[in-house]
Image: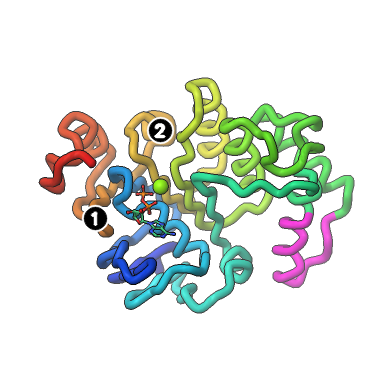
Amino acid sequence: MTTPMLEIRDLHVRIEEREILKGVNLVVPKGEVHAIMGRNGSGKSTLSYVLAGKDDYEITSGEVLLDGQNILEMEPSERAVAGLFLAFQYPIEIPGVATMTFLKAALNATRKAKGEGEISTPDFMRAVKEAGASLNIDSTMLKRALNVGFSGGEKKRAEILQMALLKPKMCVLDETDSGLDIDALQVVSKGVNALRDGTRSMLVITHYQRLLNHIVPDVVHVFSDGKVVESGTKELALELEAKGYAGFDGEKAA
Ligand SMILES: Nc1ncnc2c1ncn2[C@@H]1O[C@H](COP(=O)(O)OP(=O)(O)O)[C@@H](O)[C@H]1O
Ligand SMILES: [Mg+2]
């Protein structure tokens, strides 16, 4: 068997003495797009933060392998260099740093870590313009401080732009649809779909089925109370939408 892009083995995580992730097992093969669906509070964002390497989380057991490499001991920046990219449910605002400046610094940091030289300004401008056009991101938005005063849709589009520039091999998108109206959802989904190339893998986390009409996953996992409780084809998302989460985990709606 070829090495999966992402493999999570029996991951247990605590926050402030409380166990939030209770044995997550998940395998995303290379080139596949998997969705995680689960009710609010089931631990989806916790999983994405743990993958990103945010501190405050106590990993009590388990492994996370990115293309065969254990990433749990790595710094967040090392994970990024290894090809992991996270788009957060609540993107961080960086006052005083223009979006353009941030993007260039992020790109150069990964290039440097790989032993490549800095990208030239004309090459960078060309790349941003090209990637930005399909995401309806113009130069005015790029001059504004990253995420400061951005609408929900602008924040998500800026993240997808970052993803398009960094070309990660594993993308994790947490609630990319939250705060988006239908037009913005289409723009963001188009941007994400453009990055599907048969080798890059994605994990799309959502609690609504509607995002999966736009970003059609190869596999859907149902997440409940800190672990994956069922996996299936994209039809599983429709079944979930019809039955509600209670039909899967026996719990009442929160
Ligand atoms: N920093 C934190 N401190 C304490 N509890 C937290 C923290 N972050 C998340 N939790 C708790 O962990 C559980 C899972 O939250 P989260 O991962 O955000 O779920 P989801 O993204 O599925 O809605 C919730 O009960 C939440 O209150
Ligand atoms: Mg969440």
| Marking on residue 225 | 1
In the image, the segment drawn in magenta is: 105-119
Label 1 sits on what residue type? Asp
Nearest to N terminus: mark 2 or mark 1:
2
- Taking the spot 34% from the left edge, 34% from the top edge, the residue there is 208
Element under label 1? loop
Q: Is residue 78 visible?
A: yes
Main secondary structure of the magenta stretch: helix
Who is closer to the viewer here, 13 or 193?
Answer: 13
Query: Left or right: 90 with respect to 58?
Result: right
Label 2 or label 1, whichever lies nearer to me, is 1
Q: Quadrant of residue 188?
A: top right
Q: Quadrant of residue 43?
A: bottom left
The answer to whether the residue labelled 2 contacts the one labelled 1, judged by CB atoms less than 8 Å apart, is no
- Taking the spot 36% from the left edge, 29% from the top edge, the residue there is 210
Whether the residue under disc 2 has CB within 8 Å of ligand 2: no
Instruction: Tell me how far mark 2 sits from mark 1, CA to CA.
Output: 22 Å
Query: Residue 8's spot in the image, x, y percent?
Result: 35, 66
| Marking on residue 77 | none
For residue 108: magenta? yes
Residue marked by disc 2: 211
Query: Residue 215's spot in the image, x, y percent?
Result: 43, 35
Query: Left or right: 250 with respect to 140?
Result: left
Who is closer to the viewer here, 233 or 160?
Answer: 160
Mark 1 residue crowding within 10 angstroms, few (<14) / some (14–19) / many (20+) = many
Query: Residue 73's spot in the image, x, y percent?
Result: 50, 78
Label 2 sits on what residue type? Leu
